[in-house]
Image (cartoon, helix red, strand yellow):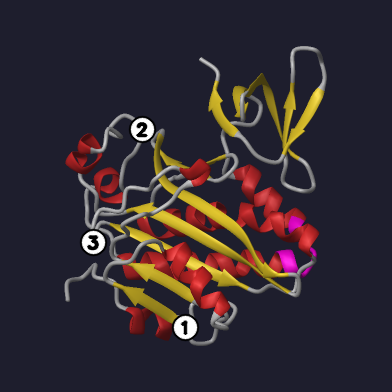
């Protein structure tokens, strides 16, 4: 085992007093860790179970996009959550993973990763991490949230060039110049995710929002937001108390968005 190989017993040992990551399921290869979590949900897997793969054949991102899952290069991970949370409050969970990733990456790697609403993580202007959170409700009496995250760790420039992503994506190894330890990153991410989830469940979501805002550089700037076939432009003012993006348009109107694709206006 090399320094950066994923070691489930190590992660479980680091998380043995916690809820998230106490049980880790590792796959050398799978279709999608989110799909693994869905199947495990039906089989009764516990809250906080974590599913990690060394590669995925159909890794997924938002809007049905594929996620580059180069074998042994990234963190491809999903968490199964069964939170004591009203269904109407579950969308708030979607803001937690990207913030947890920023906090973990900055602490472990000594960099300054930033957030881009709704859930992208950028480092030096390029995407380093993406999130796919899915509400799963197989029947009226049972529901959960599956949080999927992909972090580019050991990818080299050739990986991104072959995928046509060289201009928009990067990895932690590229940006820091040294190999990063996936085990330490996973453990740190799970710790930060649990801390944020604890705040949410304790009805202290405003503290999550304050941290989110402090790690996002797009607020106060002119942006373009795409939602389906519609496009909006204006100044990103911040987040409301639900985590929705507030956009001030040219008509001096403030619109609220719960989803969409954002970019800085050039």
Residue 113 visible from this viewpoint: yes
Determine the residue positioned at 64% across, 51% down. 211
Determine whether the residue tagged by mark 2 lies in a helix, strand or loop. Answer: loop
Per the image, the residue denoted by label 1 is 23
Look at the numbered disc 1 and give the secondary structure of its residue.
Answer: loop
CA gap, disc 2 to disc 1?
34 Å
**Residue under circle 3?**
72
Residue 49: x and y in percent read 51, 77
Q: Position of residue 98 (x, y in %)?
A: 53, 52
Which of pointers 2 and 1 lies earlier in the amino acid sequence?
1
Q: Nearer the viewer, residue 220 or 135?
A: 135
Helix, strand or loop under label 3: loop
Judge from the rendering whether residue 226 lies leftward or rightward of residue 83; answer left or right.
Answer: left
127 with respect to 135 (left or right): left
Within the image, what quadrant is residue 153 found in? Answer: bottom left
Is disc 3 in contact with disc 2, using a CB cutoff of under 8 Å?
A: no
Left or right placement of residue 112 versus residue 158 in this view = right
Q: Are marks 1 and 3 in contact (CB under 8 Å)?
A: no
Query: Relative to 136, is 44 above or below?
Result: below
Residue topped by disc 2: 168
Give the CA separation, mark 3 to mark 2. 21 Å
Whole-Å distance between the Cαs marked 1 and 3? 21 Å
**Range drawn in magenta:** 200-205
Q: Quadrant of residue 219?
A: top right
Q: Position of residue 115 (x, y in %)?
A: 53, 42
């Amino acid at each position: 085992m090399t320094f950066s190989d994923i070691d489930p017993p190590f992660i479980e040992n680091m998380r043995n007093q916690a809820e998230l990551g106490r049980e880790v399921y590792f796959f050398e290869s799978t279709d999608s860790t989110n799909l693994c979590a869905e199947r495990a949900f039906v089989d009764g897997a516990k809250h906080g179970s974590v599913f990690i793969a060394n590669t995925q054949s159909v890794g997924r991102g938002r809007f049905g996009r594929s996620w580059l899952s180069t074998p042994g290069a990234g963190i491809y991970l999903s968490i199964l959550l069964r939170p004591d949370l009203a269904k109407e409050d579950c969308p708030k969970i979607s803001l937690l993973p990207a913030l947890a990733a920023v906090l973990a990456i900055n602490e472990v790697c000594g960099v300054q990763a930033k957030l881009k609403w709704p859930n992208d993580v950028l480092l030096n202007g390029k995407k380093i991490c993406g999130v796919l959170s899915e509400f799963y409700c197989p029947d009226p009496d049972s529901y959960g949230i599956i949080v999927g995250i992909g972090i580019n760790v050991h990818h080299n420039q050739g990986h991104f060039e072959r995928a046509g992503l060289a201009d928009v994506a990067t990895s932690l190894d590229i940006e820091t110049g040294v190999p990063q330890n996936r085990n330490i990153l996973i453990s740190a991410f799970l710790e930060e995710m649990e801390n944020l989830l604890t705040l949410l469940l304790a009805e202290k979501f405003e503290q999550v929002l304050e941290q989110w805002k402090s790690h996002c550089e797009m607020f106060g700037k002119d942006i373009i937001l795409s939602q389906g076939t519609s496009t909006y432009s204006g100044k990103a003012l911040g987040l409301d108390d639900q985590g929705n993006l507030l956009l001030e348009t040219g008509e001096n109107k403030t619109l609220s968005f719960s989803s969409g694709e954002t970019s800085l206006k050039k």
